[in-house]
Structure formats: C-alpha cells, structure tokens
Image (cartoon, rainbow, N blue to C red):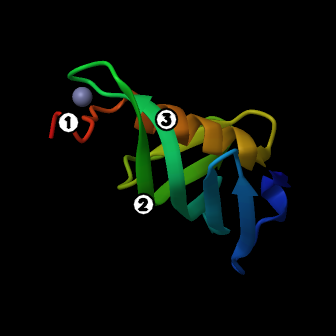
Amino acid sequence: MKVTLRKVGKTPLDFDVKSDEMTFKGYLQYHSGKLILLHADLSGSVNTECSKCGEEFKLSLDEKVEFFISDGIYEGDDIDLDVVESFDSLADLDELLISEIELIKSDYHSCKNCN
Ligand SMILES: [Zn+2]
C-alpha cells in the first residue's frame, strides 16, 4: 500500500498492511511543514535469533510505533520523534513494515531457555 504524502490531511488516514505474520495498522496524519505523522500498532510474531544461544525462535510483538515521514529532506529542528525521509513523495507502508521488522530483529532478544 502506497500513500501519496501530499494527500494526507488533518483527518487521519487509516491503513492496515500485513506481512506473513505481522499486522501494521494505524493512521497517517498531516503534522506541519513537510511532516506527516505515522502512528500504528505493530503486532504478530517474527522469527528471530536468540542473542545468547543463536537458536531461532518466535518473538511475539505488540507495540506502538510512532514517527514522522518527511516529504523530502527534513531540515527542521530536532523533534521528539524519528523522521523517515521519503524521496518520492510516497509513504510505502509495506516497505515501512519490513524496515520496522528488521529493526526489531536487530535488537537484543533472548529465547525462553536463556531468560
Ligand atoms: Zn537462547
């Protein structure tokens, strides 16, 4: 699902995308300047490796994700949330979901046996 950033206004625009085992459901809302707020729940499970023993295991997730998408390079002041820059004026939600999953996988996780 791709959303043209210019078309996102003050009224939240709902989205709901899925990968194999994850759901990314939330809304996009115009913030100010070039910034669009993305607010979503990320839930489901991912296969990841235990940082201690290296075993693959299924990690259950249910977390809130919130960041800004900038339509072009963001040159404003520091703000509280992360800013993801878009260079084609689109928010590619499937791609954002994949990068969120990759980010989670790169975190430190340990399996049941190592906890
Ligand atoms: Zn382990």
Disc 1 and disc 3 in contact, CB within 8 angstroms? no
* 10 Å crowding of disc 3: few (<14), some (14-19), many (20+): few
Where does residue 89 sit, x and y in percent of width and height? Answer: 80, 43
Left or right of 38 in this view: 57: left
* 10 Å crowding of disc 1: few (<14), some (14-19), many (20+): few
Q: Is residue 64 above or below residue 19?
A: below
What residue is shown with label 1? 113
Q: Is residue 13 above or below residue 33?
A: below
Q: Residue at x 72, y 81 (%)?
A: 11
User: Does the beta carbon of the residue at mark 1 sit less than 8 Å from ligand 1?
Assistant: yes
Q: Residue at x 81, y 36 (%)?
A: 88
Label located before the other in sequence (2 or 3): 3
What residue is shown with label 3? 47
Any part of residue 33 in sight: no
Q: Amino acid at mark 1?
A: Asn
User: Does the beta carbon of the residue at mark 3 sit less than 8 Å from ligand 1?
Assistant: no
Q: Nearer the viewer, residue 36 or 113?
A: 113
Q: Which mark is residue 63?
A: 2
Q: Secondary structure at mark 2?
A: strand
Q: Residue at x 58, y 35 (%)?
A: 99
Label located before the other in sequence (1 or 3): 3
Q: Amino acid at mark 2?
A: Glu
**Which numbered disc, 2 or 3, marks the residue closer to the eye?**
3
Q: Residue at x 78, y 54 (%)?
A: 5
Distance from disc 2 to disc 3, alpha carbons, whole Å, reads 16 Å
Q: Nearer the viewer, residue 115 or 73?
A: 115
* 10 Å crowding of disc 2: few (<14), some (14-19), many (20+): few
User: Does the beta carbon of the residue at mark 2 sit less than 8 Å from ligand 1?
Assistant: no
Where does residue 37 sit, x and y in percent of width and height? Answer: 58, 62
Q: Is residue 23 above or below residue 12?
A: above
Distance from disc 2 to disc 1, alpha carbons, whole Å, reads 23 Å
